[in-house]
Image (spheres, rainbow, N blue to C red):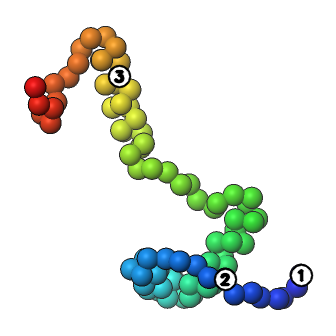
Amino acid sequence: MRNDTVNVTLRLDREIKEDAEILFKELGMNLTTAFNIFVRQSLRLGKIPFEIADPFYCDRNVARLHSSIAKAEAGELERHELIEE
């Protein structure tokens, strides 16, 4: 394995970068080391090493959506306080 390194430029929101630097420092590393760990793990696994999900589609919300759809299809629409008549 060659030990050549290259510089990579990333764009992050300033606050995210600063928060990440604080976190990684607490974990005993810097942003470069954390990024290298992420990339190496991604290559080992052949995918992003964690789940990427929209929290809106959590199990509870999906169950509520299915319930609402079933009620609507059965003609049992719920009145919602945010809907004006």
C-alpha separation, residue under disc 3 versus residue under disc 2: 48 Å
Whether residues under marks 3 and 2 lie with C-beta atoms below 8 angstroms apart, the answer is no
Q: Label 3 sits on what residue type? A: Ile
Q: In the image, 71: left or right of 48?
A: left
Q: Is residue 34 visible?
A: no
Tell me the residue that label 1 is attached to: 1
Q: Residue at x 70, y 65 (%)?
A: 42
Indicate which disc, 3 or 2, sits on the residue closer to the N terminus.
2
Q: Quadrant of residue 40?
A: bottom right
Rendered-image quadrant of the N terminus: bottom right
User: Could you say where residue 58 lies in the image, as x and y percent from the top left?
Assistant: 41, 43
Q: Label 1 sits on what residue type? A: Met
Q: In the image, 74: left or right of 35?
A: left
Q: Quadrant of residue 80?
A: top left
Tell me the residue that label 2 is attached to: 8
Q: Quadrant of residue 30?
A: bottom right
Residue extending furthest toward the top: 74
Classed neighbour count for the residue bearing mark 3: other residues with Cα under 10 Å, few (<14), some (14–19), many (≥20): some
User: Could you say where residue 45 lies in the image, as x and y percent from the top left?
Assistant: 73, 60
